[in-house]
Image (spheres, rainbow, N blue to C red):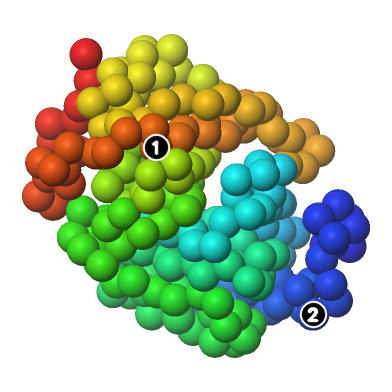
Amino acid sequence: MAALGDHYGLTERQLDQLSTILREIEDAEWAPTAVREHTDSMYIHLADSLSALELEALRGASSIADLGSGAGFPGLALAVALPRTEVRLVESRTRKCAFIERVSAAAAIENARVVCARAEEWRDGLGRNDVVVARALAAQSVVLEYAAPLLRPGGTLVDWRGRRDRAQEAQAACAADELGLRLLEIRHTEPYIGARDHHLHVFEKVAETPSRFPRRAGVARKRPLGC
């Protein structure tokens, strides 16, 4: 934890907040994650989430939306690290929303708010986010379709991925063209020693997303965009 603090310039209060997040995950039997032990959670959840701070677009964002937040990552970790940034944690499952609310309150994270809704149905978020993030959410073309309508013009999508999949990347490239997105970079990261095949796929919104998006809930997964 001290190493994370040194690397990202976190204060003692921020480190205390991150420690509280880990404690809540470890202590809550109903935490919606299989990774709960303190050290594992610190690496797999916190370090991996904070790796996106290497991106200038994320560090300078006024608003971030975390899609499919699950147990609260990467959104809660980024909210702690970026206290002046409004972070919305978008999660459709009520049980997970309740858990994120509990952790956020315990850690006194004042700039985070849970949006208990599907990404496709979050109308208040349309065109309003500087950055959208997604970690282990869905096939990349699906993530792009979820994210594009929520981004403001010039906004950035950061999609956490593991080992690169050339076929999926080619399908995502076609989806990006249709949605008004452009791939900026695929950045290899090593959030902790021994981490392998970690990549941040970074897209910019370069054109308006067609008004037919978002399609109704569930359609993106059933009929993903692509070539």
Q: In this view of the protein, which residue sits in the foreground, 80 or 60?
A: 60
* Direction from residue 150 to residue 169 in the image, left or right: right
Q: How many marks?
A: 2
Q: Mark 2 — residue?
A: 13
Q: Where is residue 157 in the image (x, y as percent from the top left)?
A: 46, 42
Quadrant of res 120: bottom left
Badge 1 density bin: few <14, some 14–19, many ≥20, Cα 10 Å:
many
Q: Mark 1 — residue?
A: 205
Q: What element carries label 1?
A: strand
Picture residue at 58% right of the left edge, 72% below the top: 25
Image quarter (top left, top right, bottom left or bottom right) of the N terminus: bottom right
Quadrant of res 97: bottom left
Give me the C-alpha separation between circle 1 and circle 2: 34 Å
Q: Position of residue 179 (x, y in %)?
A: 26, 32
Circle number at residue 140: none
N-term mark: 1 or 2: 2
* Direction from residue 193 to residue 38 in the image, left or right: left
Picture residue at 57% right of the left edge, 83% below the top: 110
- The answer to whether 181 is drawn above or below residue 110 in the figure is above
* Direction from residue 11 to residue 102 in the image, left or right: left
| Mark 2 residue type | Arg
| Mark 1 residue type | Lys
Answer whether residue 70 is visible to the viewer in this image: no
Q: Position of residue 128 (x, y in %)?
A: 36, 59
